[in-house]
Amino acid sequence: MQPTRRQILDHLRRYGKGSVKELGELLGLTSTGIRQHLTILERDGLIQGHEERGRVGRPALVYSLTGLGDALYPKEYATLASLLLEEVRSAGGDEGVQELLQKAARRKAEPYLGRVAGLDLPARIAEVARIMEGEGCLVSTSIEGGAHFINRLTCPYPDVARAHKDLCYLDSQFVGHLLETSARLETCIVRGDAACSYRIEPP
């Protein structure tokens, strides 16, 4: 990324917001010069501007990072999750991890139970696929040999799952809770397959 635009993003990340005047003074640029950089960053979806009224005078245009802009900065969620799973395993062994994942799957499913209540199995499967898509995954469904499949083409936590493959158990339990039947993981992205495919047998 162009150094000046990176400095703008760093300032907004550090202080939460910045005006054209503040950013121009910081970088030694004219208002016109700084606006050119801001326009490009806004076009790319990395920042957003809004008017902010001060104590006196006209409202000033203030910029802040968007979610996409904030995502440029490293997050340690995967490292933290791996450390926590390692601590659970050291304290309770594999059974402790499985118990934790079962509870997490139930908790994850609870907010969505109303969306699948009263639906037959094919409609539930379609709704669960939409729920997973809402979490940012690419998902398809299929029927093979009388069995239904939900195929998730992207993994939401690949780094953690590579180190802790039993994490895949969480989502098979999550799908099973919503469908009120078993969902067996038949293929898995972190094992080198093209998708995480959950085989659903009619209850």
Image: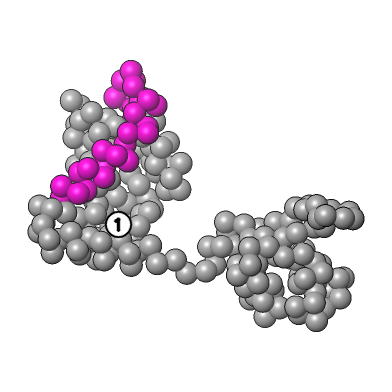
Q: Is residue 113 above or below residue 157?
A: above
Lateral position of residue 93 relative to residue 119, left or right: left
Crowdedness near tag 1: few (<14), some (14–19) or many (≥20) residues, C-alpha within 10 Å: some
Figure quadrant of residue 34: bottom right
Kind of residue at disc 1: Ile
* Residue 72 in sight in this render: yes
Q: Is residue 50 above or below residue 33?
A: above
Q: Residue at x 83, y 55 (%)?
A: 55
In magenta, the rendered stretch is 98-125
Q: Position of residue 53 (x, y in %)?
A: 80, 52
Q: Position of residue 190 (x, y in %)?
A: 28, 60
Magenta part, dominant SS: helix
Q: Position of residue 158 (x, y in %)?
A: 34, 60
Q: Nearer the viewer, residue 120 or 42?
A: 42
* Residue 159 in sight in this render: no
- Look at the image and say whether residue 110 sits in the magenta stretch: yes
Quadrant of the drawing holding the C terminus: top left
Q: Residue furthest top?
A: 118
Lateral position of residue 4 relative to residue 88, left or right: right
Quadrant of the drawing holding the N terminus: bottom right
- Look at the image and say whether residue 25 sits in the magenta stretch: no
Secondary structure state at the residue bearing disc 1: helix
